[in-house]
Image (cartoon, grey):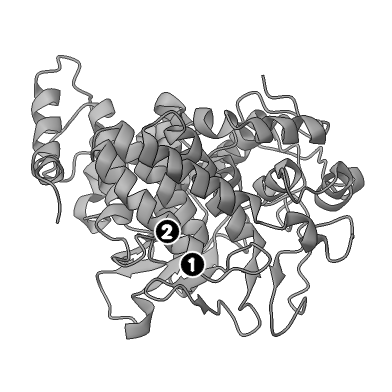
Amino acid sequence: MKSLYYLTALVLLPAALSCSSRQNSSRPELTVQQQKTDFPVISDDSLLTLTEYRTFRYFWDGAEPVSGMARERYHEDSIYPEDDKNIVTTGGSGFGIMAILTGIDRHFITRAEGFARLQKIVAFLEKADRFHGAFPHWLNGETGKVKPFSPKDNGADLVETAYLMQGLLATRQYFQQGNEQEKKLVIDIDRLWKKVEWSWFTRGGEKVLYWHWSPDYGWAMNFAVRGYNECLILYVLAASSPTFPVSAEVYHQGWARNGAIVSNQQTYGYKLYLNHNGAEEYGGPLFWAHYSFLGLDPRKLKDQYADYWQANRNQALINYQWCVNDSSKYAGYGKDCWGLTASYSINGYAAHAPGKSNDLGVISPTAALSSFPYTPEQSMAALKHFYYALGDKIWGPFGFYDAFSQQYNWYPKRYLAIDQGPTVVMIENYRTALLWNLFMSCPEIRKGLTKLGFTYH
């Protein structure tokens, strides 16, 4: 049963935001393009809070009820297979766990409510299928049994496990000074973290980490994780493990490809720093600048290969500039409407990115909104446009829908966990650095970063 506290917030928050903004003498001015809906004009700060709140609800109201974990997807506009509604995603749940911490800190829910949900999630994970300590991509939320992501992907998914651990370690830090029940949760999370056999995924001592392992097919997926893409956090966690660590050589030879990860490419005057796999000119889909950095703080993060703040900021600016420059090609594109990343598309799912072959005319709101730390002015312009100009075409019970295309008059009412989570977390990092501060407070993460040659102060 939802608490009175939560129900009151659910009913009153939008009205309260509107009321508070009317009392604000510096009410934001909107362009003619932005003033197209009946949504009340509120302050920028209130709009950020409202966006976080609505999106957080994906992981609160929309969670799978038995496990408390994040459903892989939620569709309002279509019926999907009956057995799909109970499928949860481990990586998306890691993002959702961080969204729940945000919800507690912003008083969307009480600390006790948030703790109870997180306790349920951890208890579920303790009994769920694991393979050498690593979780699969998908689990059945009712049984904890693996659901194959593809025919041979029915075992460990080390990258999704990394995203899950990123969220769990932030939670461990959040509750470490709490009451006795909270301290027990801290111990339970620590046990899950220490059981992941990161070094085993070097496949017998190779100088690289492998993404998948199956109890039926072994290493048949054969996916060595090399940079640069969304997987930096995998190597940081693997190097930081107190129980099954990998050597620094695995990072430098595997991930960084003996230095071949470095790029001198400049696009629109912005240096890319890193060779983005298959997207060397424009930097690839924007989730590459988000997923690893929900907890890993890029603001002063450097190693011999890159300044990660500048690398991420420049990738976001290139993505923005492509949409501005390309505005004559696709309807809707421009300074107020931008953001290309992996999301639903007009034909299934696609990794939208700058470049003629990767831009399909689809805007994914999470791309611009999760980039708030890097591009605050451009992201705020996009947020206002999405909310005030496009309104309920793309705004629903859990915030902005996953993707849309004005070019094709395509406005599906669908959500994906892996896109909702970064929106909440990165907006909060922009505002308070909450998740960055929590994750970076882990002593083993600091040791792991130092081991790999990072500076982060």
Identify the residue shown where x is 30% and y is 44%.
114
Q: How many labels does the image show?
A: 2
Q: Quadrant of residue 368?
A: top left
Residue neighbourhood size for the residue with mark 2, other residues' Cα within 10 Å, grouped as few (<14), some (14–19), many (≥20): some
Query: In the rendering, at what x and y percent does residue 119 appear?
Result: 37, 51
* Residue 311 or residue 433, whichever sits in front: 433
Q: In this view, does 260 lie to the left or right of 91?
A: right
The numbered dot on residue 370 is none
For badge 1, the amino acid type reads Lys
Q: How far apart are marks 2 and 1 (CA)?
A: 7 Å
Quadrant that contains the C terminus: top right
Please determine whether, in this image, residue 37 is positioned above or below residue 394. Answer: above
Mark 2–mark 1 contact, CB under 8 Å? yes
What residue does disc 2 label? Answer: 123
Few, some or many residues within 10 Å of mark 1 (<14, 14–19, 20+): few
The secondary element bearing badge 2 is classed as: helix
Q: What secondary structure is marked by label 1?
A: helix
Please name the amino acid that badge 2 sits on: Ala
Does residue 287 appear left or right of residue 62 in this picture? Answer: right
Task: Please state the horizontal and vertical placement of residue 52, each as a whole percent of the image.
Answer: 31, 40
- Observer able to see residue 443: yes
Q: Is residue 114 shown above or below 41?
A: below
Q: Note whether residue 328 is visible.
A: no
Q: Position of residue 275 (x, y in %)?
A: 77, 47
The N terminus lies in quadrant: bottom left
Q: Position of residue 442 (x, y in %)?
A: 60, 32
Residue under label 1, please give it: 127
The residue shown at (72%, 41%) is 240
Looking at the picture, does residue 342 appear above or below residue 259?
Answer: below
